[in-house]
Amino acid sequence: MNNNLTPAATVLVLRDSEEGMEVLMVKRSKKPPFENLYVFPGGKIDEGDCSKDLESYCDGHNDQEASLTLGLNNGGLSYWVACIRECFEEVGILLATKISGEKLNLEDEDKSKFDKYRKMLINNEINILDVCKEEDLILSTSNIAPLSHWITPEFETRRYDTRFFIAYLPEKQIVQHDGMELTKSLWINPNMALKKALDGEMQMILPTTENLKSCMEFKSAMDMLDNQKQISHNEIKPILPKFFKDNGNWVVLFPGDEGYEDH
């Protein structure tokens, strides 16, 4: 991996509703690098996401399995953990259960306690492992599956090596965007989100729209999660878009496109 690339994880939280599949989208604040854009929860991998001790608190993966799934030598589990932590920090959804099997109720009895943990995580006063130990939690890594792998184009100053994942929304959770980095959150059908992006109602960048497109072939979120769990790392190729000007217009090429290697 290029040393200038920051490893990051982004998660499309999905749910099934009467209107069909819906994805959680959030609007970034005016702060760079993603000002005013509609995106999915996510961010860079933190040191606390990489703790070896987290293996005992994950229900579906150990680091070896997770790394194999992503085609990495090691450190794969940190991407699943980062999805869970970022999702909790940014929108208040915690993909976890009690070790006893009991589900969290963040609508009611567990809400105030976990609101405090969330603030402490945001302020870097604790890490996700501390929360697991304190509350006897198991992270729902089996509820998360890889979707795509995007690398920031070379002309950008901040470059990320971002793995996109999907996750199914647990019961009894409410979305509360943080109000600082995020100024809005909404559940929306992927087709409708793409239409609003095309109409200029919702500003999005290329990886966002392309990942929304990959949701369109599935009838339900559960179907999509089941499908993605079966996919091997060989089927998720890294995408490094290349941009160039042709007769004054910007053109984008993806790996495999004609002329990609020439630019």
Image (cartoon, rainbow, N blue to C red):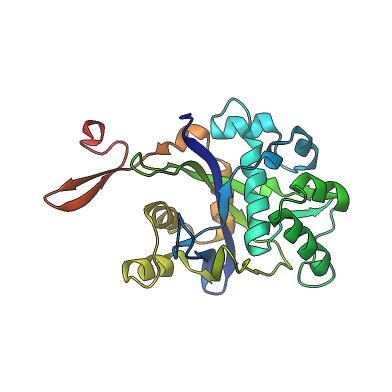
In the displayed image of the protein, which residue is found farthest to the top? Answer: 73
> Does residue 189 appear in this view?
yes
Instruction: Classify residue 202 by image quadrant.
Output: bottom left
Q: Nearer the viewer, residue 27 or 96?
A: 27
Instruction: Classify residue 209 by image quadrant.
Output: bottom left
| Spot occupied by residue 233 in the image (x, y as percentages of width and height) | 51, 34
Residue 255 located left or right of residue 132: left
Instruction: Say which residue appears at 64% left-offset and 44% top-offset.
Output: 80
Rendered view: 174 above or below 147: below
Instruction: Say which residue appears at 33% left-offset and 42% top-offset.
Output: 155
Q: Nearer the viewer, residue 61 or 175?
A: 175
| Spot occupied by residue 79 in the image (x, y as percentages of width and height) | 61, 41
| Spot occupied by residue 214 in the image (x, y as percentages of width and height) | 43, 53
Give the quarter of the figure containing the C terminus: top left
Instruction: Say which residue appears at 71% left-offset and 34% top-offset.
Output: 62
Residue 5 located left or right of residue 252: right
